[in-house]
Amino acid sequence: MNFKLIFCIIGGGLGWFVGEFYPTFPLIVVAIVFILYDAWTAYQLDKRVHLAYPDKAKRREAKFTSFAFGKVIRLTIPKRLWLIILAFIAEHWVFIHLQIPLSYIVTGVLCFEQAWSILENESSCRDENESRFWKTLQRIMVDKTERHFDVTLNELKDDGSITEEKVKAAREIIAKYERIKEAGNEDT
């Protein structure tokens, strides 16, 4: 087999790819920066969670691991980059008579998605004494603290204690369920 021919074909294909898609490279760099910064804020959130609730975590290892970061590198980044490249292909090969910057729009949407996740990470698991900005964001965004535990956030805040009110509420739910179940059995 002629290795020179194989290297020429590979080099030609790579040269064509770079020549054809070089306008997307700055967009790709911006998207990668947003994705990596989102991963960094997830790591910072994990550190805050373990500092705030050291005895409440059922698992002792951190949620942000090299495996999770490898998943970001292996899966998240390539998927997002292919979206940018596909938008560029549609922009330049399909919609050639329209002046719609699809690759810029897709990159903007991806960056907005990552920016939203960054703000969720930054505003989650904040102390009551911290900035009012983070508390205001928590009214709009999801609190990601629960994702770092195997329990819900309400269980963390309640210390998992059982009160008479909780027992009474549970009994009411069970009684309601049994009434529905009996009504279903009577109909058959």
Image (tube, helix red, strand yellow):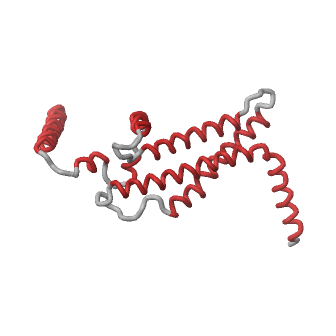
- The image position of residue 170, as x and y in percent, is 16, 42
**Quadrant housing the C terminus:** top left
Q: Residue furthest top?
A: 98
Is 4 positioned to the left or the right of 24 in the image? right
Corner quadrant of residue 92: top right
Q: Is residue 31 placed above or below 1 in the rendered structure? A: above
- The image position of residue 131, as x and y in percent, is 41, 40
Q: Residue furthest bottom?
A: 1
**Quadrant housing the N terminus:** bottom right
Image point (35%, 62%), residue name: 59
Is 20 positioned to the left or the right of 27 in the image? right
Image point (80%, 31%), residue name: 96
- The count of marks equals 0
Image point (86%, 57%), residue name: 12
- The image position of residue 3, as x and y in percent, is 86, 71
Instruction: State the residue in front, 121 or 108.
Output: 121
Q: Is residue 4 placed above or below 96 in the rendered structure? A: below
Is 147 positioned to the left or the right of 31 in the image? left
Corner quadrant of residue 112: top right
Q: Is residue 21 placed above or below 43 in the rendered structure? A: above
Image point (49%, 42%), residue name: 119
- The image position of residue 147, as x and y in percent, is 39, 51
Instruction: State the residue in front, 136 or 96.
Output: 136
